[in-house]
Amino acid sequence: MCKFLLPVCLAFAAALPARADEAAPSVPVALDGNTAVVGTERIRLANSVAPEMIEPHCMPELRAGLKARNRLAELLRLGPVLIKRSGTDRFGRTLARLTVGGRDVGALLIQEGLALPWQEGAASRETQTRHWCGTAQDPKAP
């Protein structure tokens, strides 16, 4: 019985989410410019918003989104990733700030021009479209 329970307990413990400010147990994988997966946990960067890749409003936004995702992946591979959780978003993703080598990943993406600071509301989406596409209009995706 003990031989069976120990692996089950270890597997359960490994699946538990890390504390609010704990290092990621494995290398996170970048899904897009502001979402990473650590184990089974989807993490949305809380302080930045990257260009859309799934439903871009223009080709420049799609290209910028791909660059942002690639850069996020590079940053996450640089070393241990510290996760500072702050809640969940409407899609059930963990909202968090990620740091690598003491540097905030979202702030780096903003500094490098690959993301914008997070803002709430519909006006924010219009600002993002204008920034990436040069217009507030919503042209059809490429």
Image (cartoon, grey):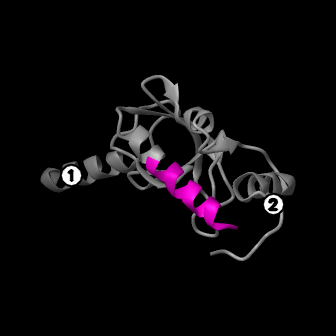
Let me know if residue 60 is in the magenta part.
yes
Q: Amino acid at mark 2?
A: Thr
View extreme (top): residue:
102
Main secondary structure found in the magenta portion: helix
Question: Which of the pair 45/123 is nearer the observer?
Answer: 123
Q: Does the rendering let one see residue 88? A: yes
User: Earlier along the polypeptide chain: callout 2 or callout 1?
Assistant: 1
Q: Which element is circle 2 on? A: loop
Above/below status of 28 relative to 66: above
Which residue, given by chain and number where applicable, does mark 1 sit on? 7
Quarter of the figure with the C terminus: bottom right
Residue shown at the point (59%, 44%) measured from the top left? 114
Q: Nearer the viewer, mark 2 or mark 1?
A: 2
Residue shown at the point (20%, 48%) measured from the top left? 6
Classify residue 101 by image quadrant: top left
Which residue, given by chain and number where applicable, does mark 2 sit on? 135
Q: Is residue 28 left or right of residue 115?
A: left
Which x, y percent locates residue 12?
Answer: 34, 51
Which x, y percent locates residue 29?
Answer: 40, 51
Please state the extent of the stretch shown in magenta in the rendering.
56-70
Question: Which of the pair 51/23 is nearer the observer?
Answer: 51
Q: Does the rendering let one see residue 42? A: no
